[in-house]
Amino acid sequence: MEDDPQKREIARRRHFAFRLNLFFFATFFLFSVLIVRLAILQFVEGPSLREEEEKRGSTKVLIPPIRGNIYDSGGKAIAYSTSTQSLYYSIEPGEKKEDSIATARQLYYVFQQHGDPKAAVSLEQIVKNMDLDYKKNTVSVPRRIKSGLTPDEIAYFLENRDLFQGIDIVEESIRHYDTANTAVQLVGYLKKFGGGAENGLYKDKAKTDDPRLKYLQQEDVGYDGIEYMYQDVLRGKNGLKVYPVNAASRIIGPPVVTKPDKGDNIYLTVNRQVQETTEKAIMDQLHYLRTTPTDKRAPNAKTGYAVAMEVKTGKVIAMASMPDYDPNIWEGGSISTDDYNAIKYVLQNGAVSPVIGPYDDPKEQRKHPSSIVFLGSTQKPLSVLIGLNEKLFTTSSAYTDTGSFYYGKEGSTRRRIGNAKGHAYGTLDPSSAISHSSNPFMAKMVGDALYRKDPKNGVEIWDKYVKQFGLGVETGSGLPNESKGVIGYFHEKEAASSQSALILASFGQMGRYTTLQLAQYAATLASHGKRMKPQFVKEIRDTDGNVVQGYKPEVLNEIHFPDAYWKEIEAGMLKVSVKEFNEAPYKVLRKTGTSQQQVSGKTVENSVFIASAPADDPVVAVAVVIPEGGFGADGAAPVARKILDAYNDYIGFDGVPKKPAGSPSGGSVGGNP
């Protein structure tokens, strides 16, 4: 029986309507999903996608900043930077030494044809700079082959880049140092950021995402002294070249350039003439001590340290750690093992940290003292102040110096304190005890008396006093690697007795301190109790010469004693016998010190000296230390005289230089006459 055509048509229309509705529903659903997705893209994911688009649409190239300069107090550059184009060479993986030498020959030919004849580089120097034996760098570190490329050299290498494997031209800042080697260890030096510095001093600097502050792997950064202390000031900020790129990361247009900000310039408190006089005076004196045929000969006097610090301002006018070295050896941010070995004994600033003389053998090193020495008799003015303030005696008290003072029980533990060369000075008051440098006076009237006054707390009382004068605490200078010194009286108290600790401390044999601490101590005595923060920077200026930051004197602490106590120690210091000052045109408060120290079972004598001038109103204080230099009057005092003369000549105790501007720095050749 055949189907009814009418029914068939009705069924067909129903199926069609169903399929049509299903199509419209599916279409509606798809459009709804698309609309929702578009809304999410636009309003939710849009900002991040736009950021990604911009990232993909440009590439940033960092332009290293030009480092700021370091000047002396007169405005003459000690350290300065120049912008230059340098050629770097990277050792490719698997590259043979012969291949690198062949490249060196190619480079030599190009330099000969297109370079400046005045800046010619030999083939041997090119090979040395390649560091093919990895003496200065690891394999991954690019080597600087030549700086100061000429435009012709740059053009040739850019046009023929494919001919030179591992070659790259880098715009960078080159650090130069004054050839006079002024205040070398104070100024410091630079090392490559990517040469390991980022793992030590600069580990936090590597974390920044700011492209203008981001350190470059080939950038030179401060690694000691002022260069490190003021790294952020000197560095400046990176420049940026932002290039537009296509999807294939190819540059498709000119860059948008943000110029780098040059670092600010630092003006030190160091006076060049006084500094150079100080350095020369030390070296002359060391030579004299090692070669003189007299009884002053000191064959192991190989290092010397001195600091000149203004009493009222804290400005450090000179700081010398001698011998020094040529800091230009660090040009490029790294040096060879041979070069490092040649300077490693003079690299650190011995005026603030422990340095031992140039002894290669570790066993030999242990036989000699470091630059941190006992005060010796330079302690005695402070000992008298402590005795007076603790009411252990008065300014008119008398003591009979028989040449010996004994303490301890009878027998093997009994100890004798005597004077240098066996002297017995007879009746002494406090000021004459200073001028004669009486050890028995200090032992009996100060050390033993303080012990008997307070057996339990005497050492703590002593410690409180000396630290107020800057001995055994930081000076506040901020210099890297500065030592607080080494105090021994607490150990002596535990190992022996409080009595022994105080007696030995009273004449300077219980604390070893830096030359900067000695200078701060001398200045504190001269100022009647104002301990000043040592200042090395006079001001900071931007590239236009505007003062960005100035500096004011800063008092760290004050010690208040009656005027009579200060006058008593000054009366003694004025009479200390030092022939170098017998005919000085100004009066000097001074104290010699012969710092005896046990090293590897033998006693060595370090020469120590402090002074301030002019005596009636001190302007500058000086400290000089010459390890193994003998008596302070013989070893250190002649250096101090030349420093004070130089200060008066080139700055003036009254603010008026005694020598006209442009006079050569002074100091006669040789040591004592």
Image (cartoon, rainbow, N blue to C red):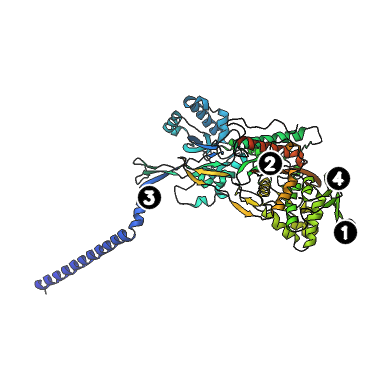
The kind of secondary structure element at disc 4 is helix
Q: Residue at x 79, y 36 (%)?
A: 296
Which residue, given by chain and number where applicable, does mark 1 sit on? Answer: 409
Which residue, given by chain and number where applicable, does mark 3 sit on? Answer: 55
Q: Are marks 2 and 3 in contact (CB under 8 Å)?
A: no
Residue neighbourhood size for the residue with mark 2, other residues' Cα within 10 Å, grouped as few (<14), some (14–19), many (≥20): many
Q: Quadrant of the N terminus?
A: bottom left
Q: What's under tag 3, amino acid-wise?
A: Lys
Q: Residue at x 57, y 34 (%)?
A: 178
Q: What's under tag 2, amino acid-wise?
A: Tyr
Instruction: Tell me where residue 90 appears, x and y as whole percent.
Output: 51, 38
Which residue, given by chain and number where applicable, does mark 2 sit on? Answer: 305
Label 3 vs 4, first from the N-terminus = 3
Which residue, given by chain and number where applicable, does mark 4 sit on? Answer: 422
Q: What's under tag 1, amino acid-wise?
A: Lys
**Vertically, is 404 above or below 116?**
below
Q: Quadrant of the C terminus?
A: top right
Label 4 vs 2, first from the N-terminus = 2
